Image (cartoon, grey):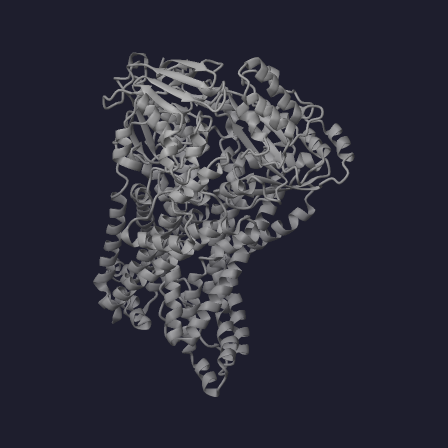
Amino acid sequence: MTWTRSKGRVGLLVLAMLTLVLSLAACGGGDDDGGDEGAADGVITINWGAEPPSLDPGLATDTTSSNVILNIMDPLVKLEGEELTPTPSLAESWDVEGATVTFHLRDDGQWTNGDPVTAEDFEWSWKRTISPELAADYAYQFFGIKGAAEYNGCEENCDALRDQVAVEAVDDLTLRVELTSDQPWFIQQAAHHSFLAVHRPTVEQFGEKWTEAGNIVTNGPFQLARWEHNANLDLVKWADWRNADDVALERINGRMITEGTTAVQAFEAGEVDEVGALGGLPPEELPRLKGLPEYEQTPSLGTYYYGINTENIPDVNQRRAMSLAIDRRTIIDNIAQADQLPATGFTPSGMPGYDTITPSSEWLPESGDIERAKELMEQVQNPVTDVTLVINDAPGHRDIAVAVQSMWAELGIETEIQQQEWAQFLESLGPPPARSTDAYRLGWIGDFVDAINFLELWTCDSGNNNTNWCNEEYDSLVEQARGTADEGERFDLYSQLEEVMFGPDGEVPIMPIYFYTNVSLQRESIKETYNQNLLDQIDLSEVVEE
Amino acid sequence: MTALVVRRLIWTIPVILLVIFLTFVLMRQIEGNPFRTSERAIPESIQRNLEEKYGLDRPWYVQYAKYVRGVFTGDLGPSLVLRNRDVNDIVREHFPVSLQLGGLAMLFALVVGIPLGMLSALRANTWFDYGAMFVSSVGFAIPSFLVATLLIYYFALQWGEYFPFPTSGWEGWESKVLPSIALGLGPMAYFARLTRGSMLETLQQDYIRTARAKGLRWRRVVVVHTLRNSLIPVVTAAGPILGFLITGSFIIEQIFAIPGIGRYYVTAVTGRDYSVVMGLTVLLALIVIVANLVVDILYGFLDPRTRDARA
Amino acid sequence: MATPAPRTASGEGTLPLEPGLAGPEAGAAIQQSNLWKDAWYRYVRNRAAVVAGAVFLLMLAYCIFWPLISPYDPNEVDFSQARQNPSLEHPLGTDSFGRDLLTRTALGGRISIGIGFAATLVILAIGVAYGATSGFIGGKLDNAMMRVLDALYGLPYLPFAIITLAVIGDAGFWSLVIALSIASWLTTARIVRGQTITLKENDYVRAAKVVGARWQRVLVRHLLPNMLGILVIAVFLELPGVILGEAFLSFIGLGIGPPDASWGSMAQEGYRVYRVFPLLIVIPSVAIATLILCANFIADGLRDALDPRTRET
């Protein structure tokens, strides 16, 4: 009989299968022991919210990477206090004469391998970031320096152009920079992580892998202790940092939980001491979380807005009507739910000079003004009643779009919400935006603390102007602002810029909805000192466990 | 037998080429810029630099050839989005995690499902049978995201004091239990029903009745004759299921914050990280092929009739 | 009794259909009516299958007809009514936007079940065409086609669905149908091929060939009707997989866009609020589970009904 021949075989077979599966289960995914968990004796566990795409200051572009880097490296300048004023960090002082800025470095800056930090490090690092070979996304931050844009865009004879970039280490502790014009915000910009120095021998030795935990050499208050990609990133205090005595935390264990619900659960189970500062909290849970003593909310320099393709919706009255119809208060209270501030202009609250700059625009009423919107709509000659609203597929944006859809419906506008995946969404933004896009959703988060960073987006040739809107008066005002050193005068110019967009004769090419806030849950033992500034940065060297 | 194996192994090569080609073509069709990760636009000059650095400005056949060569020499290229990492690194660090997760889920499915099915068959049409089949059907039907949510909510949060399971992560054996169950529940139910059905059918065969008539002890009959034959369909199904577990676990990985391949895959496709997508697809295809091959070999080993039919 | 057919490698078992129990004629027409009537009687005796069938039909009716008579506009946003528990006015409660859940679940069902059936039909169409041709013609073509099939087996199902969706661009109804069917027709093709090969050897087919009937006629008049049984079962076997696939894709955000919803995208919405309002994730999940359970029992019932040898003692 055929069956008996396979008598032993099935048994063998099942055994084989079980062995295979068991070995699969046993091997792989090593159980490393990380640091201790739980807030105890200077050890805390936080959530980075995502895997940092890169810890190379020249290549990092996102908030998570930026936060890690700024805690393991020493910037020339740090932004402190509510106003985010530039304070000396690695640079103990600086002189500004017109378009020339000179930084004087401290003499006790050190790399973790013992090498001193010199001005040459900065010169080499900045030129590296500007170089075309590195292809750094943020090279454009340096374009305010003479010769930088040319070097970055060079096709041949690059070495010569490199020498012409006006960054020079005059001596070990002096760094001189020549800018293309007077840029009063340059010192502030120098606090950005792209302006950090990297350790040349390490980069040259390890190439692209120099940021791995075993290879990296840093010069800041913490060191990279462990980096398991997509799982954990731990920092440990560096005892030889120049101000090590002032640093209270011994170790920071970092998780990378991207799913908001999972992060909140981890916090509630006591596995993490902080969640949300990077990555946010799910808006739907906020009503429940707001009541907790661990809840923390701080303003953030960012604006959430809907942009309009002005070629598709050319009538300014329609745009004004659409903006009037948006009930910002309802959106904030029911969807975003993080006590965001309803937008009154494009520059967000918290920006220096905000009170002067903001137009308190009549086109951006807090609870919408549907009556006036309808009136205006009637004045429109050829109203566009079929609007395609393009959003990317994150849940929060979808919800807001649905709400706005119903608000515009009252004006007789039928809105089709086109939900696209991220990369596709970016493609359809352009610029110039895809012809089928009538409206889209976007947000802008500040790079540094000056309103020019927001307002220069809307110049005719700005790479971030996705509206097809071009206004010469606006452009010339921006030019003027760029060359004005006096703060008061600049704020005035900024306010004029806002008026062009949102004043009584404003063209309303975009419809700001709210200004961002940061929300997080923090264990009460660290809540006092775990602070996130307007630029979403957390200075871990200041955190103290009570 | 060896001829079969050798033939199948040789066929793996054109299959892989086909997979690479399809993925390559598909990825090129999608619009999207891998270098633009945020809403900030990238200045032209920088975009050009990036394309040059990664060879994206060369004609497509050059890129394709280069890539194929890379696959066969073991170099899957750099990631376009994670600028300091190679696809090889990503695979090396994350694939074992997915493998382990899939393996554990499979273990759970087999160890619980097969005995359950067996017992149900032996006690066919009793309350035990109905109960077991109902429970397993429900386990099969409820989407795994709900199962995962319930497991976390009850075992890690509400009753967290009694159980050592964390709500997320992949460190230490405690964190591996809930995700494995969540992922393995469906296959477990499937195996249970499969075993039951197959066993019932075998039990009706003449030779079983003969054995009983001969007076052999029931247990011996069950174990020696019935069980082995009933497991054949289970074995058949196991291969593709294992392949599916490893390649389709991204929701569980997302919910439990497990650093596996699945999460990376979805992120890479949405971020247009071409090299990662291609590398991972090739890898996943290899897994599926190997799993199927192993099963087919074992199956041919087992059931001589199919060997002849397929020759 | 007919000789047992060899099992195919990936199916759960084939269904050798024996020639009609009544009468010596081997013509296809008479065979069919006997077969179906017999099957119907056997099906009805299986209680679970009957209940499942009834529930299934009820769900279909609900999804199709309820939105037509519901007093609520499924897209009307009214935050004052958000997240209400079930009540007389809203038997299933409301969602985060204050929309009636009974209505939205029905609409979600239209999309989920719609995609399920559409994708299953596409899978069947491709699978039958491929498998029947390969099995029937046999020989070298069969070999080649099976080799290609083996090659395609290497395509991981869900990842390819994701890529396909990204290629097509906008994730609408038909893009999901295509994405879900593109890698899942393979098993059906194999089963159909296996069945075709078995049937090919049956006497009445050989008789038809001897008589000189053209192969198309044989295929259409003799083989396909006998496979109808398997095909119907295959529909109910593939349906759960497709529906779950759609749910998964929607859950990770690649599915239907607003304001339409499928059960999967509703579940995703629900997942984010489950701590505050668990109903939102439970309802679509239960709907999906019910559908899958019914489909399974119906498939079981059909299989038992059409193959008298697998009666349960």
* Near-viewer residue (C179 or B251): C179
Where is residue C277 shown, x and y percent of the image? Answer: 53, 33
Where is residue C95 shown, x and y percent of the image? Answer: 59, 36
Q: How many marks do you count on the picture?
A: 0
Where is residue A55 shown, x and y percent of the image? Answer: 35, 31
Q: Is residue A162 visible?
A: yes
Query: Is A79 situated left or right of A376 in this image?
Result: left
Image quarter (top left, top right, bottom left or bottom right) of the C terminus of chain B: bottom left
Measured along the vertical axis of the image, is residue C165 above or below residue A97? below
Image quarter (top left, top right, bottom left or bottom right) of the N terminus of chain B: bottom left
The residue shown at (75%, 28%) is A372
* Near-viewer residue (A114 or B305): A114
Query: Is C284 situated left or right of A503 in this image?
Result: left
Where is residue C48 shown, x and y percent of the image? Answer: 49, 56
| Quadrant of the image occupied by residue B87 | top left
Measured along the vertical axis of the image, is residue A186 above or below residue B256? above
The residue shown at (29%, 68%) is B207
Q: Is residue A270 visible?
A: no
| Quadrant of the image occupied by residue B16 | bottom left
* Near-viewer residue (A346 or B62): B62
Query: Is A371 situated left or right of A228 in this image?
Result: right
Query: Is B43 situated left or right of A39 in this image?
Result: right
Question: Which residue is most to the bottom?
Answer: C211
